[in-house]
Amino acid sequence: MSKRTTCALAAILLLAGIVMAAEWWEKKPYTQWSDKEVKRMLDNSPWGKIHTVTIVNPTVTGQRSFESIGTGDLEREKRNLFHMRFLTSKPIRMALARQAMLASEGRMDMAGIQRFVESADDQSLIIAMTVSSVPEGASSARGYWTALMKLSTPNLTSNTFLATKTGKRVYLTRYEPPGQDGMGAKFYFPRTMEDGTPFVGIEDREIRFETQISLIETGNFSGTPGADENVRDERIWMQFDLRKMTFDGTLEI
């Protein structure tokens, strides 16, 4: 075998090793994940991401903003973080299970935890959404949370959908406001198209989630004394790379 052939073969084997290398979430059991790894899975992974909406404080700048701003918050601006996760994906359920374990300091029903992790849904795709802010506890985030509590399925069916890179789209079938489970609002979508074929596969490359949340702005828009109100519709969206959403060698969504 020539030196050139040997080098080429070595390069191929090295590339194959890189491609086949397990990701960090497959290298150890979820029951051993650290708090940092849990947060990374929930907010910065193929299955969990954050959409950020920045709100400018009118008490500092004089610019208009949401009704929930101007109630004593002194920061110039606030970053409202919409955490979006595919709840129907096993890696997200693993992260939520581990998060509960860490919070309970080991006082958990492990059989119940494992049932939750393995509780696949073959009918729906579910996006779970929570809201936080930087700085923590900003009133604007509370305003968004209140909006999520008030939403209902009829409010969302025409403007909330999942769409693929290949042009397929399914609309919301059910919405659940945030409840006591701590997982946030839940958006349900069908796994199949109207003709019964699967909605999504790894060949679709990307999947995009979109919804709309309406809030009330207040400010001196007309130039006359007193505060005016204006409704603002905020598009909340996120794109996920289906080619990276594989777990144990298969698409997990």
Image (spheres, rainbow, N blue to C red):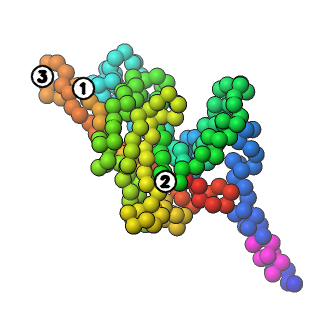
**Residue 248: % across, % down:** 68, 57
Gap between marks 1 and 3 measured at Cα: 13 Å
Picture quadrant where residue 144 is located: top left
Q: Amino acid at mark 2?
A: Gln
Residue highlighted by disc 3: 224
Gap between marks 1 and 2 measured at Cα: 42 Å
Gap between marks 3 and 2 measured at Cα: 54 Å
Residue highlighted by disc 2: 123
Residue highlighted by disc 1: 218
* Marks 1 and 3 in Cβ contact (< 8 Å): no
Identify the mark nearer the N-term, 3 or 2: 2
Please say whether residue 18 is one of the residues in the magenta stretch: no
Q: Amino acid at mark 1?
A: Thr
Identify the mark nearer the N-term, 1 or 3: 1
Q: Residue at x 67, y 25 (%)?
A: 104
Q: Residue at x 83, y 78 (%)?
A: 6
Q: Which residues are magenta?
A: 5-12
**Residue 59: % across, % down:** 31, 20
**In the shown orientation, is residue 103 left or right of residue 202?**
right
**Residue 226: % across, % down:** 16, 18
